[in-house]
Amino acid sequence: LQQFVKQGLLEKLEALAASLPQSLDDLAAAEQLVRAGVLQLGRELLQHWSTVATAQTTAPQCSACAEAMRHKGYSTGPLVTTLGAVRVRRARFRCEHCGAECYPHDARQRFRGHAVSWPLAKVIGRLGAQLPFGQARESLRVDYGVALSKQTIETICEHAGAALLDEEDALRSQLQSMPVGQRSRALPD
């Protein structure tokens, strides 16, 4: 499969190179073609990789009843990344006792349960901190070719802010439990 994917991507890269304008005066058009083409190649590579990458994990315990969960195959679902939307394979586990299901890789693949990758969530957080959500949405579309709703951007920013507050609260509690003389050495830059 890797050889097949590699050959297909090389053919597409060659086609992209052949589609470039002949004149250096067309640099802006060439830049746009290359950027769009490389993003497309990146999406395809990520998509192919996600179907063959090892998704093994130890069987988790059910959070509801503490029974061992059983692997029930894979589910493929959407994930929006900085390269655009892809479909990612997810290991699915089910508790035979109570019927609860979980996808253990989601914590690493998806930002706080949203169908966006962690790198994209970082971009959204920066844009949402600097711009009104509607402008952040437009900037995300123009700069990354990623279309998300204004509400999704707002929700992701709120969850990112809550995560930062939780981290700060935990650090504050840790510092307050230290002897006064050690606090200044333990403070973050």
Image (cartoon, rainbow, N blue to C red):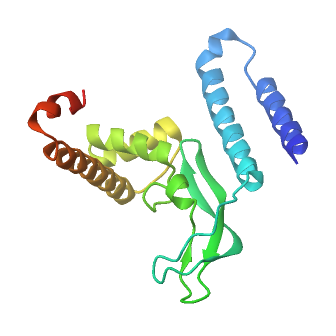
Closest to the observer, 27 or 115: 115
Q: For the C terminus, give its image quadrant.
A: top left
Query: What residue do we see at 70% from left, 59% from top?
Result: 56
| Horizontal side of residue 69 vs 6, given as left or right | left
Tell whether 11 sits left or right of 26. Answer: right
Q: In which quarter of the image is residue 28?
A: top right
What is the residue that sits farthest to the bottom in this orientation?
97
Whole-percent x and y of residue 111? 45, 54
Number of residue marks = 0
> What is the residue that sits farthest to the top in this orientation?
24
Relative height, residue 185 to residue 23 (above, below): below
Q: Work out whether residue 17 or residue 187 is closer to the camera in this orientation and state it.
A: 187
Q: In front: 27, or 113? A: 113
Q: Which residue is drawn at 71% across and 38% down?
A: 41
* Residue 186, x across and y down, in percent: 22, 32
Is 1 positioned to the left or the right of 170 in the image? Answer: right
Q: In this view, does 187 lie above or below 163?
A: above
Using the rendered view, name the quadrant where residue 43 is placed: top right
Residue lying at 47% horizontally and 38% vertically, measured from the top left: 142
Query: Which residue ends up furthest to the left in the rendered image?
Result: 180
Instruction: Indicate left or right for 92 with 151 as reference.
Output: right
| Residue 83 x %, y % | 59, 42
Percent position (x, y) of residue 117?
A: 51, 50
The residue sitting at 34% across, 59% down in the picture is 151
- Residue 125, by quadrant, is top left
Identify whether 16 is placed above or below 142.
above
